[in-house]
Amino acid sequence: MRITYIRHSAFLAEWEDIVCLFDYVEGELPEIDRDKRLCVFASHHHSDHFNPEIFTRFADHPRHTFILSDDIRTVPAGEKAPVVRTGPDCRRIFPGGKRGAMSVSTIGSTDCGVAFVVNYAGKTVYHAGDLHWWAWPDDTPEEERDMKNRYFAEIAKLNGVRLDAAFLPLDPNYWMGFDAMMRSADIRKAFPMHMWEKYEYIPKFKAMSVTEAYRDRIADITAPNQTFTI
């Protein structure tokens, strides 16, 4: 499986006959093989995770499906547009390829929409969307406790699931959610996202003592269009 970082929270995961594109808004894309099934995901409606132009940009791909959080209300042109909407705690099976069907599961978010868990051909990919342990300067103690409790309740749903690639928010100064996920989930390779192109934060985070047990499993993203093989 090949992983390509596009920009911000957008990643492309590519198998031999399926391509999954997550939270694409803008940026250069590698050429997508028209013989492969294309699944375009959007975790929620925020403008840094969903751009309605995806409906026209990928409409001419021979086999494409849009898999969207159900908080996205935008309707694509065409009555037969291949759109599937999903809420949290759902599981759906989609046509796959030579290796069988593809499963897509969701969990809830601490902000909007869902996080995706995609399994195909023995590999599992997780995209957190905006599921994160957010912390804001004006939060009350009650809000802080509620955020922490909701976050841990959601990621606990991933117990026992091996994640070959996990795309996780790592906003500068808000690293607790990334750390908690690495400690509680079985993650082979973690890809920081949602950094607003502040790539220098990755080595700073990896240098922190809290990451000692897992820093070798954090991908060193330094620029758009980097590729990784898993």
Image (cartoon, helix red, strand yellow):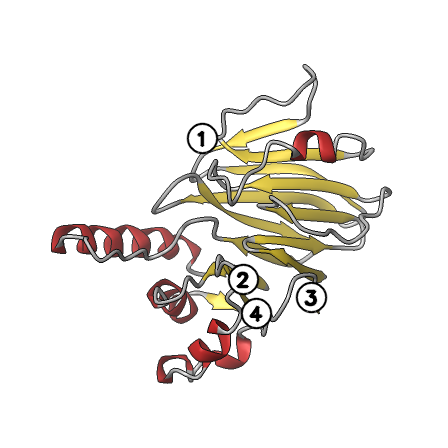
Measure the C-alpha gap from mark 2 to mark 4: 20 Å
User: Closer to the camera: disc 3 or disc 4?
Assistant: 3
* Camera-nearest label, 3 or 1: 3
Task: Check disc 3 and report the residue beneath it.
Answer: 226
Q: Is residue 206 above or below residue 224?
A: below
| Three-letter code, disc 4 | Lys
- Type of amino acid under label 2: Glu
* Residue holding disc 2: 197
Give me the C-alpha separation between circle 2 and circle 1: 26 Å
Q: Quadrant of residue 211?
A: bottom left
Question: Which badge, 1 or 4, is on the more N-terminal residue?
Answer: 1
Residue at disc 4, secondary structure: loop
Secondary structure of the residue carrying tag 1 is: loop
Q: Are marks 2 and 4 in contact (CB under 8 Å)?
A: no
- Residue at image mark 1: 71
Q: Which of marks 2 and 1 is in front?
A: 2
* Disc 4 target residue: 189
- 3D distance between C-alphas at marks 1 and 4: 29 Å
